[in-house]
Image (cartoon, grey):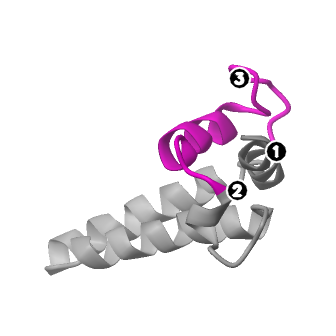
């Protein structure tokens, strides 16, 4: 994981995912049965979102090929996310 801080977050990937996927959400939005968000809840939420988007995009062969490339890039980017930091931030809100 990249150790370079970005806008007060662990790194750019963590900041970007926190901003674009979790801003305005609470732990209950991720898991209605949980009192607190976990890093697993956060990661699963984003993975499910990407899976849903990929499925919606896969309407023809061209899109399937593009989707495979984009999905690979997204998954590589998500490897740098500090999921625990996002969960901790959501639990503080």
Query: CB under 8 Å between callouts 2 and 1?
Result: yes
Q: Secondary structure at mark 1?
A: loop
List the residue tagged with mark 1: 1
Mark 2 or 3, nearer chain start: 3
Q: Give the residues in magenta.
A: 1-26
Q: Write down the quadrant of residue 59 in the picture.
A: bottom left
- Quarter holding the N terminus is top right
Q: Secondary structure at mark 2?
A: loop
Q: Left of 70 or right of it: where is 83? A: right
Foreground residue among 29 and 43: 29
Q: Write down the quadrant of residue 34 in the picture.
A: bottom right
Q: Classify mark 3: residues with Cα within 10 Å, few (<14), some (14-19) or many (20+).
A: few
- Alpha carbons under labels 1 and 3: distance apart: 13 Å
Q: Left of 93 or right of it: where is 75? A: left
Q: Secondary structure at mark 3?
A: loop
Which mark lies nearer to you, 2 or 3?
3
- Quarter holding the C terminus is top right
Residue 20 painted magenta: yes
What residue is at 82 percent from the left and 47 percent from the top?
A: 88
Residue 76 painted magenta: no
Q: Which mark is residue 6?
A: 3
What residue is at 66 percent from the left and 64 percent from the top?
A: 43
List the residue tagged with mark 2: 79
Q: Classify mark 1: residues with Cα within 10 Å, few (<14), some (14-19) or many (20+).
A: few
- Percent of width and height locating residue 30: 60, 66
- Alpha carbons under labels 2 and 1: distance apart: 8 Å
- Percent of width and height locating residue 27: 67, 59
Q: Left of 3 or right of it: where is 68? A: left
- Alpha carbons under labels 2 and 3: distance apart: 16 Å
């Amino acid at each position: 994981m990249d150790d370079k801080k970005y806008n007060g977050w662990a790194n750019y990937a963590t900041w970007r995912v926190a901003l674009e996927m979790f801003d305005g959400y609470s732990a209950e939005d991720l898991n209605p049965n949980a009192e607190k968000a976990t890093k697993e809840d956060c990661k699963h939420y984003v993975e499910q979102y990407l899976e849903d988007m990929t499925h919606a995009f896969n309407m023809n062969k061209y899109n399937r090929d593009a989707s495979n490339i984009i999905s690979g890039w997204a998954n590589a980017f998500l490897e740098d996310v500090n999921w625990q930091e996002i969960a901790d931030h959501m639990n503080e809100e």
